[in-house]
Amino acid sequence: MSALIYLHGYLSTPQSHKARLTADYLQRHHSQVRLLVPTLPEEPEQALAAATATVEQALVDAAGAPVGLAGSSLGGFYATVLSERFGLRAVVINPSVRPHLRFSHYAGQPQVNPHTGREFAITANDVAALAYEVPEKIHSHRYWLLAQKGDELLDYREAVDYYAGARQTVEEGGDHQFQGFERHLAEVVEFLQLGR
């Protein structure tokens, strides 16, 4: 059975808006595709370990059927790391490109996950773990970048440069959440080769 693994963003949850839209779409149009949305801890090393375990199990369960990745924001970064590690196709939505540069500003500051109430702090080790995982070169044919110029958190131009050579859809306006994501779901499934 083919699988789509959706990786949510930082301080988000498996119940994120885009994850729910994806679940609804697959249930209505591609019930043969299994959707997996792991809970990603705030700490990058733990989040990547959780995402990696999900991919490894999905590949076993798929028994040769396609497995694709979709990730939003920091989840887009994790999707890129895993795409390079496992040779999978990935759709990245307003992705974080070099998150260690952004996270270094928050190291040591108390943080609270607004969805769970969990208190934590980003450490220097977290920042180092993110920096270590950045793929300097990507296999651009595996990616589809979905970006909106109105993203208030990340500069879409960084993603456009990083994913040069990949399929790219860059829209005017919008925001970090990526407004109208549901418009692209049919093509997401097609690009990830899951509807076969």
Image: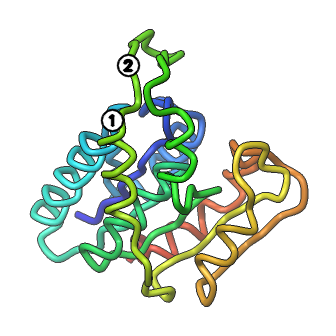
Q: Earlier in the sequence, mark 2 or mark 1?
A: 1
Q: Is residue 137 above or below residue 48?
A: below
Q: In the rendered view, does 173 fall on the left or right side of 126?
A: right
Q: Is residue 93 above or below residue 167?
A: above
Q: What kind of residue is marked 2?
A: Phe
Label 1 crowd bin: few (<14), some (14–19), many (20+), radius 10 Å:
some
Which corner quadrant holds the N terminus? bottom left
Colour convention: rainbow
**Residue 185, image x and y in percent?**
60, 59
Q: What kind of residue is marked 1?
A: Glu
Question: Which residue is denoted by mark 2 in the rendering?
Answer: 120
Q: Which mark is residue 52?
A: none
Q: In percent of the image, x 42 and y 50: which residue is there?
A: 6
Of residue 11 and residue 91, the one placed in the foreground of this image is 11
Q: In percent of the image, x 63 and y 85: which residue is there?
A: 164
Q: In percent of the image, x 46 and y 58: which residue is there?
A: 77
Q: Quick one: SS at disc 1?
A: loop
Question: Which residue is denoted by mark 1 in the rendering?
Answer: 43
Q: In the rendered view, does 3 fall on the left or right side of 97?
A: left
Residues at marks 2 and 1 touching, judged by CB atoms closer than 8 Å: yes
Label 2 crowd bin: few (<14), some (14–19), many (20+), radius 10 Å:
some
Of residue 66 and residue 80, the one placed in the foreground of this image is 80
**Residue 182, image x and y in percent?**
67, 51
> Spatial distance from mark 2 to mark 1, Cα to Cα?
9 Å
Which corner quadrant holds the C terminus? bottom left
**Residue 135, image x and y in percent?**
39, 73
Q: Quick one: SS at disc 2?
A: strand
